[in-house]
Image: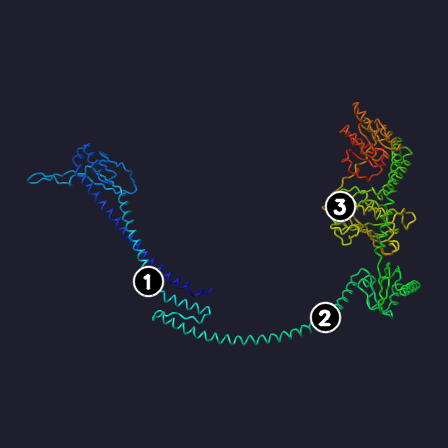
Amino acid sequence: MQTQPGSSRTGSLQTTLFTIFTVVTFLISCLFITLHSFDKASTLRRHAKKEVHLLARQVADTVRLALFAENVDALVSVAEKAGQVPGIARVVIRTVDGRVLARFESREPTHTGDLISETQDVLSLAVEPSPESALPVPGSGALIGTVQIERQTEDLKLSLYHDVLVSGLLTLCFWLAVSGLSLPVLRRLTRSYNALVKGVQSIEEGDYSSRIEVLSNDESGRVAQAFNGLAQTLEQRQTENQRLHRQLVSSIEMEVRAKEELSQTNELLEQEITERIHAEQAARTSEQALKALMDVMPVGVLTADQKGRVQYLNGFFAECFGYGLEEIGSIEEWFARVFPDPEYCRAMSLAQAESLARQHGDPLEARVTCKDGRVRQVIMSNQRHGDQTIFIVIDLTDRELIKEQSIKVQKLESLGVLAGGIAHNFNNALTGVLGFISLAANLVGSGHCAQEYLQFATKASQRAAGMAKQLLTFASGGAPVKKPVALGRLIEEAVSLTLNGSNVRPELKLPAELPQIRGDEGQLIQAFSNIVLNAMQAMPEGGTITVRAEVGSRSCKDPNHGNLATYLSISFTDQGHGIAEADLSKIFDPYFSTKQTNTGLGLASVHSIIYKHGGHLTVESTVGVGSTFTICLPVSGGAGEPVAEAAPATLFTAGPGGTVLILDDEEMVREFSRKTLGFLGYEVVVCAEGAEAVEAYRARFEAGQPFLAGILDLTIPGGMGGVEVARKILAIDPAARLIVSSGYSYDPVMARHKEYGFCAAVAKPYKAEELSYELRLLHG
């Protein structure tokens, strides 16, 4: 920032000169005082040292005889007299061997760090032989001792301080006087400079009429005269510039007014042009927006002129039906393509014409054939708009598929309600049948002729139990009891058992380590076996079934369960006769089968099992080539863990004895259990009601004769079930050993029986050997 000339600049110069002069004089004064002080201090110390030296010499001469004679009193008297001298701090008289004979200490405080000390030797008087007489020569004898005198310097310091203070005051007065006299002189010297600066400041501010006062004829005066001439010249030029500026402003104002009028005219013209452009753009934008909207609409849109020529069709129309604008010349040509049946095409053309005649006709539901041959269910409506006819086609195919899927699920749910009840009661009945057969087989002995027939009866009962188990997969309560399973072993076991003895060769393409899944081992084996069995039946003359497994297959995407993040795909490919396209949508329906001897539950149960495991099942088939069933299951992470094998069958032998409590609502089951356990050496108490079982256990426990074990049916119609009975018995006897039994083997209580207080679980129907094994296992 530029400094403004004026009094501030003048004052700065005057102040600077005054400051420099006063500082220099002050420094000179300080230097004088410092030199004077050093000289004074040196003089005082030198005189003090000389006085101490003379005093020490005098004392040494005085004490020579007394020291030689070691007269202590005389020596002390001399030391005290010497100590009376002002400033003396200490007087010490010593012998030649260093013994102190006399000492004087001043009573005033002594600063040992700042003392003047003088030590003087005391010599004996020497006697030199002469012709006349023997005369003593002072100071030329032997050393007989020393005299040490120490003097304080405090008085010297006080004297020096007083002298410096007086000198400083005098110097300060001198400095103040000189500074005061210099101020008027500086004012006189800077007056011309002040006037010059003031004039320059006025000129710089634009006041060219002001003049600088000329106070002298020296250099500053001549500069002032030059500036006055310059100010006069600038004043004349300023007057001329102001006149020219007024003329220029007047000319600019006239030009601005002319431009404003021209600008207003241009603005009106531009506004008119802009409005026309905006109107054209709005029309084009509206048209483009309408076409863009129609292109993204999830319905087909087609427009035609009065003669039926197609002018436009949107993207959904082309994507859904496969026909582009260049392939459809007219409405008649379009109808001929999407309605290949001539009778159906004539009927739809007539209905469309009637709808146009009524202006607002009802929508028409139709089945159109796409370019790729697929048939889609649509709703068609049309309307005239000026010279154009607009056709809107809504695709209902996905809705129909969802409707069919919903009907299929409802069928499965209805079947589940029926299957659950049938399977449960059927298993209860089979428990008695299979149990008495196994009991009879053990009673007649292994060589009896009835053994063969009993084995046939056992296999028939087990086959019936398998059918009941298959029915349970449809039950709403038949959720899989999931646990970590090794899927590779299940696949190998299912394929091996199903194809055993057949003319179909398996080809397994499984990775070395499949990921672990959580599932119901029994249900999954059943699902795999049913698919393999279906493939084997499709190849009566033999062939190969290929089983592949891979992780992360893109085919595992299902709208019912979403896109699985990590999943396992298992595909079963056969070389059979394939499945007709008309049957593909029905193969998972319960009781649907193209074979006279099948029940139609195989693939339906597979669909139900996979769905309840959180996965899905798809099928691809080509008639005459074969079919591929693909199962997609979510994985739980990690490699598959080996599953513990079932306990091996044990002999039907007597148990440890004791009393066993049986709770079951079926009389045949109670009777079978009573007979079997009685045959094994147990005492049996049977109950048909839960409350009765609780009271029976309480009575024996309070009598000190608790039951050895209790076998409780999980479900008691109209009464207390096994879970509640177990809870009450355990409240009576926490050490009670209870076994849960149910014909509903997929109930979660059966898989997690220990969480409900049970020690073991047996699924109905069971044989006498199984009951014997569980009891002996329970009691070691």
236 to the left or right of 756: left
Tell me which amino acid carries mark 3: Ile
Residue 771: which quarter of the image?
top right
Q: CA distance from mark 1 to mark 2?
A: 85 Å
Q: Secondary structure at mark 1?
A: helix
38 or 611, nearer to the observer? 38
- Mark in front: 3 vs 1: 1
In what element is the residue under mark 3?
Answer: strand
Q: Is residue 270 above or below residue 543?
A: below
Color style of the picture: rainbow
Q: As rendered, which of 93 and 134 lies closer to the eye?
A: 93
- Asked if residue 440 shows in the view, the reply is no
Label 3 sits on residue = 517
Among numbered discs 2 and 3, the one appearing first in the sequence: 2
- Quadrant in the rendering for residue 490: top right
For residue 185, the mark is 1
CA distance for labels 3 and 1: 111 Å
Of residues 458 and 391, the one nearer the viewer is 391
Q: What amino acid type is highlighted by mark number 2? A: Glu
Tell me the mark number nearer the camera, choosing from 2 and 3.
Answer: 2
Q: Which mark is residue 275?
A: 2
